[in-house]
Image: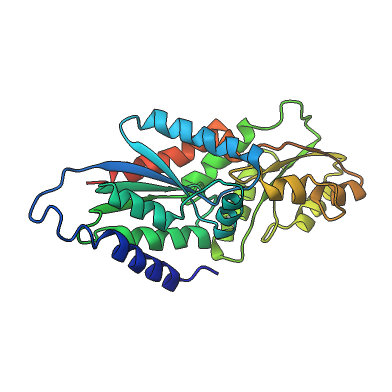
Amino acid sequence: MFKASHVCGLVLVILLMFLGAQAFAGHGAERAAKKGILLVAFGTTVPEARAALDNIDTKAKARFPGLEVRWAYSSRIVRQKLAGQGLHFDSPAMALARMMDDGFTHVAVQSLQTIPGEEFHALQRTVEAFSGLPKGMEQVTLGLPLLAEPADVEACAKAVMASLPPDRNKNEAVILMGHGTHHPANIYYPGLQYSLGRLDPLVLVGTVEGAPSLDDVRAALKAHKVRKAWLQPFMAVSGDHAVNDMAGDGEDSWKSVLAADGVTCVPVLRGTAEIPAFVDIWLDHLQAAVERLN
């Protein structure tokens, strides 16, 4: 689990690295405001999945043409694996430190998480640590994840309905695989299921590590006598969970488990960051974060 002390320690090291040289530079001079955007994703090691993040990058730059957009990956494991492939991504703290050293005074950080769980709160602590530092950034704001407010749940439900597989028939189910968590923020998944259930009882939400579970999905399929289901990731990217845990050929994959129940499954490997309706929700949150910059 990510601990607050890790953030404090890292920020202290960064301050020693980047602020020491600035202590005597421009003494008494007033700095010109320089605004920027930092997009923060969990990250992915699946090359094909990065197209989803590239899509958000393109949309963010188009919506905020006057602001430089930078990236950070919050997962240390993902960063280390990518480094072994010669691909280097900063942590959120290091990315903010670089922006601080490059003269940014106001930065809007946008979380690309799905729910405000542990990852989001770790990012929130990092943002708070960097905002208002002496000789550092004047202000750092944080945009909310995909699901954060009641209106987001309704917006996501509509986005799901607008992005259902075009070849799906009425008696076929659509199953969304979310990550899930033991954090209280897991409540957003059953909340989304409630909203979807009012629109289409055969659009189901399941999670890998939370509730609703795959067994909950199986019970719903059995109750509705469903014989065919479409499997879609409810995650920003169609990464390892989608490729292996959802659509893989292993006996424990959702596709295999449901096939054993007599349900034919059709995987759709497309992350929410590839779908305009979901991207718009994230960018609306980013818009709010940008507008909060003084």
Report how many numbered discs are placed on residues in the image: 0
At 24% across and 42% down in the image, what residue appears? 34
Is 65 left or right of 216, judged from the image as shown? Answer: left
Q: How is the image coloured?
A: rainbow
- Residue 7 locus on image (x, y percent): 41, 67
Vertical order, 122 against 266 (above or below)? below
Query: Residue placed at 64% from the left, 40% from the top?
Result: 47
Quick check: can you spot residue 66? yes
Residue drawn at x 41%, y 39% is 284
Residue at the extreme bottom: 5
Asked whether 140 or 179 is in front, the reply is 140
Residue found at the very far left of the displayed protein: 28
Q: In the image shown, does 140 or 54 lie closer to the viewer? A: 54
Vertical order, 7 against 172 (above or below): below
Give the x, y percent position of residue 201: 72, 42
- The quadrant of the image that shows the N terminus is bottom right
Residue 91: x and y in percent read 46, 55
* Residue 35: image location, x then y, percent: 27, 42
Q: Quadrant of residue 197?
A: top right
Viewer-proximal residue among 232 and 140: 140
Is residue 205 visible in the rendered image? The answer is no
Q: Residue at x 50, y 55 (%)?
A: 74
Q: In terms of image quadrants, where is residue 4?
A: bottom left
